[in-house]
Image (tube, rainbow, N blue to C red):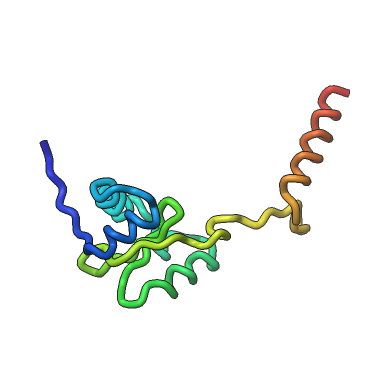
Amino acid sequence: MTTTTYFATQHSIDRAMERINLNEREAMRKIDIALQRGKCAENYTSSRERKYLENQSHNAIAVAFDNFCYLFSYQGECITVYALPDWWERKKMYNGKEKIRRPKKYFSFYNEEMEARIYA
C-alpha cells in the first residue's frame, strides 16, 4: 500500500470542505489531484483565462481544476481554494466572422435546417 503525503494548510482544507462540500479526507485528495492534473496560467490559450489566473497568483501558483482555483505556494503547499467565475472556459462561437449571440437558438435552428436538407 502506498501512502501519499498531502501538503495543505488547515485553512485550505477548511475552505475546500466549506466550498466544495467534501469531508476532510476527500478535500485533501481533491487538493492532491488538483496539484497533479490542474492547469496553470501558462497552459491556457485564452488570454482572458490566463490573465485571470496571473492576477490571482500573488506570490503563489494559481491552478484551475474542476471549476475551482487552488492557490499553491512554490513549495507545493495548498494555501486556499475558491470558486472560479461563471464565465470560466466558455468559448465565443462564430459562424465565419459573425459572432453567434444565442448558441442554443442558433444550433436548434441549424440542426432543423440540416435535417430538412438531408431528408428532402
Foreground: 30 or 42? 30
Above or below, 64 against 30 in this view is below
Q: Which residue, as the protein is rendered here, is positioned at the far right? A: 120
x 31%, y 72%: residue: 60
x 26%, y 48%: residue: 29
User: Is residue 86 shown left or right of residue 77?
Assistant: right
x 31%, y 49%: residue: 30
Foreground: 102 or 37? 102
In the rendering, at what x and y percent does residue 15 appear?
Answer: 33, 61
Q: Quadrant of the C terminus?
A: top right
Quadrant location of residue 38?
bottom left
User: Is residue 28 shown left or right of residue 84?
Assistant: left
In the rendering, at what x and y percent does residue 107 appear?
Answer: 75, 42
In the rendering, at what x and y percent does residue 51 appear?
Answer: 49, 71
Quadrant location of residue 31?
bottom left
Above or below, 103 against 59 in this view is above
In the rendering, at what x and y percent does residue 20 appear?
Answer: 39, 52
x 11%, y 36%: residue: 1
Q: Which residue, as the protein is rendered here, is positioned at the far top? A: 119
User: Is residue 107 shown left or right of residue 120?
Assistant: left
